[in-house]
Image (cartoon, helix red, strand yellow):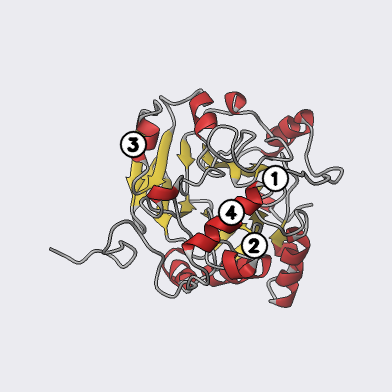
Amino acid sequence: MTDKPYHHDPSGGFRNPKGSPNPQIGPRRFIRYAIRQLRKTELPAVPDGHVLDRAAVDAGIIAGGNPSVTWLGHAAFILRTHGKIILTDPYLTRCAGPGSFGPKRYVPAAIPTEELPRADVMLVSHNHYDHLDATALAAYPHKDYTQVIVPLGLKSFFRKRGFAKVEEFDWWQSWSEDGLTITTLPAVHSSGRGIHDQKKTLWASFGIRTAEENIWFSGDTANGEVFKEIGARQGPFDLAIVGIGAYEPRKIMKEVHASPEDAVEIVRAIGAKRALGMHWGTIRLTPEAPFEAPGRFRQAAIDQNYGEENALIFKIGETRSLKNTAAA
């Protein structure tokens, strides 16, 4: 019998790759911090133009064509590549929690769940409520058609909700069909939807490869040494879609979420030509200014010689062609 990979915790569940940030606080302090955040109900003022109206969303999707990328908000995207439609982390409803308990969106999703296009593939990176949205999944109208790909432990969640085609994978395992290959890759994060299921299911990023494009979707991740390995084994990437928000206070968040500066380090490590910042401007999870991340992301690209023009920021609902993701 071969030894299990390092990220399979010998005591049960999963753990982050070697070289990941070490926890700086205990679980009780983290829970107290999370409760304090949940008690904050004020919503920020949203800058004009941050969210496109529906007519502009639809027009952009038509103009973007295939290949293209559309931001629905937070970590939810519609990717069109190689004639396929891929949907990522479709958190689209108001509350990121059980029932009405949890952080609330301050901007709507660009497209409501019941009006989503019929995706060929749905990727869900982990089971936190702001990425795995049970209400949206219940309303999704194409459960018989869409191929769902998830990390270990999440297959039953989808099968119980009526999805007919679900595959779960460990890190470095791949699924392929009709010229599209999805590889489930490491991330530095965690999992759990309650107190008693922490780290019982796996978390992941994804590589999305066709003959035309190679794209990386980060899911939720902090920085870590593993991204050099991803770059060596799966890179270079034409585009990285990377989280840049929910990063304060750093003593707590550095082990689960990248700062904007970390995000640039990550995309450089994996060999991404361009990077699109996500996981900001949608829902208040942490106390930093909600519209601070894009400026820091662009400045970090300058400071780290990545190129400000390669640090992309979208409006919610915006589509750009993958043939020219640097276009304004």
Q: Nearer the viewer, mark 4 or mark 3?
A: 4
Q: CA distance from mark 4 to mark 2?
A: 13 Å
Q: How many marks?
A: 4
Residue 37, position as x, y percentages in the image = 65, 52
Residue indicated by mark 4 = 34
Secondary-structure class at tag 3:
helix
- The circle drawn on residue 156 is 3
Residue at figure coordinates x 59%, y 42% from the top left: 76
| Front residue of this view, candidates 96 and 328 | 96
Q: CA distance from mark 4 to mark 3?
A: 27 Å
Residue indicated by mark 1 = 282
Indicate whether 102 appears above or below 225: above
Residue 140, position as x, y percentages in the image = 52, 26
| Front residue of this view, candidates 156 and 24 | 24
Q: Quadrant of residue 233?
A: bottom left
The single residue placed furthest to the left in the displayed view is 1
Q: CA distance from mark 1 to mark 4?
A: 18 Å
